[in-house]
Image: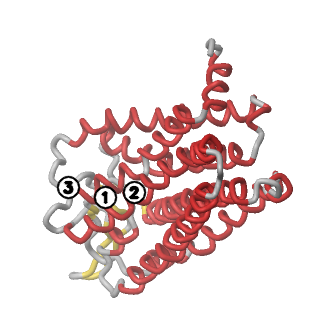
């Protein structure tokens, strides 16, 4: 009998917890991956905390663009912290068991933070669109209240749309298998263990992806098309270059975020032949962007870089 299930009759068991096995095919040496993953996690926490401290201390950074960046830093830390403590405990302490309730909460948190990340990218795109296309109206439109309301809408949107994901997963009947070939509780990975029909879960997962990330990406693309059209109409090459430079960091992060999602979706089609690849990409997508985002902005944003030096007590 598989551990962590209760026998209800001679042929039927009721799962009481799941077992996260880690990365498929490399169980014997996967603990070595804990070192780079732990480094990425610490880098994500440290770099995003530095972003928050810098924006808070530097009055020159009390602008909507940097306020959205600060919110993105909070989301990034939440996203990484949703999965990394459990993954490291699996590798270091062999703590592979996770209760059903903890698993469903993790499913909710992962989807919610990923949706928030996409939503903040959308808010940042709209911010740049108004700043470049309507510069005279920008101060009266994009205010502190605007930032607060936009962020609140993103939170409310994701909570409402994501809640059905763990609810539907919790309604499935887990009657025998409880071992998950993963380091975290993914919706489809968990519901694949169910003994009853899980088609509704799969359909809602697809609908949710299009409702949140699909819609966000379409609006972001349209915003940058309008930005590009406005920049090309500028008579000054210097002004055009300055306008584009304010968007470059944002564009790099957007391209990386959505490209990995597309690659992850494609690799799931070949999951049976190469099970390690989608699992590894899924984990890395939850920890690399939080570590990468602050570095991109630090390297490409002069005011933020100067603020870093001041916070760290270094000469700039």
Q: Earlier in the sequence, mark 2 or mark 3?
A: 3
Q: Residues within 10 Å of mark 2 (few under 14, many from 20)?
A: some
Circle 2 residue: 98
Residue 115, image x and y in percent?
A: 54, 63
Write the residue at 76% across / 43% down. 63
Q: Quadrant of residue 66?
A: top right
Q: Alpha-carbon distance for marks 2 and 3? A: 18 Å
Please give the label number shown on residue 19. Answer: 1
Residue at which label 3 appears:
24
Name which of mark 2 and mark 1 comes first in the sequence: 1
The Cα–Cα distance between marks 1 and 3, rounded to whole angstroms, is 13 Å
Element carrying mark 1: strand
Q: Is residue 73 visible?
A: no
Tags 2 and 1 in contact by the CB under 8 Å rule?
Answer: yes
Is there CB contact under 8 Å for labels 1 and 3? Answer: no
> What SS does tag 2 mark?
strand
Looking at this rendering, what residue extends furthest in the front direction?
Answer: 235
Q: Quadrant of the C terminus?
A: top right
Q: Residues within 10 Å of mark 3 (few under 14, many from 20)?
A: some
Q: Residue at x 50, y 64 (%)?
A: 111
What is the count of numbered marks? Answer: 3
Distance in Å between CA atoms under marks 2 and 1: 6 Å
Between discs 1 and 3, the one toward the N terminus: 1
Residue 171 in picture, x, y percent from top left: 45, 81
Q: Nearer the viewer, residue 136 or 235?
A: 235
Bin the neighbour count of mark 1 within 10 Å (Cα to Cα): few under 14, some 14-19, many 20 and up.
many
Circle 3 sits in a helix, a strand or a loop, which is it? loop
Name the foreground residue: 41 vs 262.
262
Q: Which label sits in the foreground, 1 or 3?
A: 3
């Amino acid at each position: 009998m598989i551990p962590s299930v209760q026998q209800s009759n001679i042929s039927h068991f009721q799962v009481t917890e799941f077992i996260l096995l880690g990365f498929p095919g490399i169980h014997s040496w996967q603990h070595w991956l804990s070192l780079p993953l732990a480094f990425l996690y610490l880098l994500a926490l440290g770099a995003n905390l530095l972003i928050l401290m810098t924006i808070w201390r530097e009055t020159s950074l009390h602008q909507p663009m940097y306020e959205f960046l600060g919110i993105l830093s909070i989301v990034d830390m939440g996203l990484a912290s949703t999965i990394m403590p459990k993954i490291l405990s699996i590798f270091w302490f062999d703590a592979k068991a996770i209760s059903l309730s903890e698993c469903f909460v993790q499913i909710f948190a992962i989807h919610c933070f990923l949706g928030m990340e996409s939503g903040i990218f959308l808010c940042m795109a709209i911010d740049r669109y108004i700043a470049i296309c309507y510069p005279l109206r920008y101060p009266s439109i994009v205010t502190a209240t605007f930032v607060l309301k936009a962020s609140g809408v993103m939170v409310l949107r994701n909570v409402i749309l994501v809640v059905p994901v763990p609810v539907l997963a919790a309604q499935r009947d887990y009657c025998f298998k409880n071992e998950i070939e993963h380091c975290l509780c993914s919706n489809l990975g968990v519901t694949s263990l169910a003994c009853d029909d899980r088609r509704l879960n799969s359909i809602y997962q697809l609908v949710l992806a299009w409702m949140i990330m699909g819609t966000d990406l379409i609006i972001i693309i349209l915003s940058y098309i309008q930005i590009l059209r406005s920049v090309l109409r500028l008579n000054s090459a210097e002004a055009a270059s300055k306008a584009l430079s304010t968007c470059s960091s944002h564009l790099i992060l957007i391209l990386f975020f959505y490209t990995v999602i597309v690659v992850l979706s494609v690799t799931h089609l070949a999951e049976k032949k190469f099970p390690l690849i989608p699992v590894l990409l899924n984990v890395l997508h939850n920890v690399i962007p939080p570590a990468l985002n602050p570095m991109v902005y630090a390297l490409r944003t002069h005011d933020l870089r100067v603020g870093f030096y001041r916070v760290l007590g270094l000469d700039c």
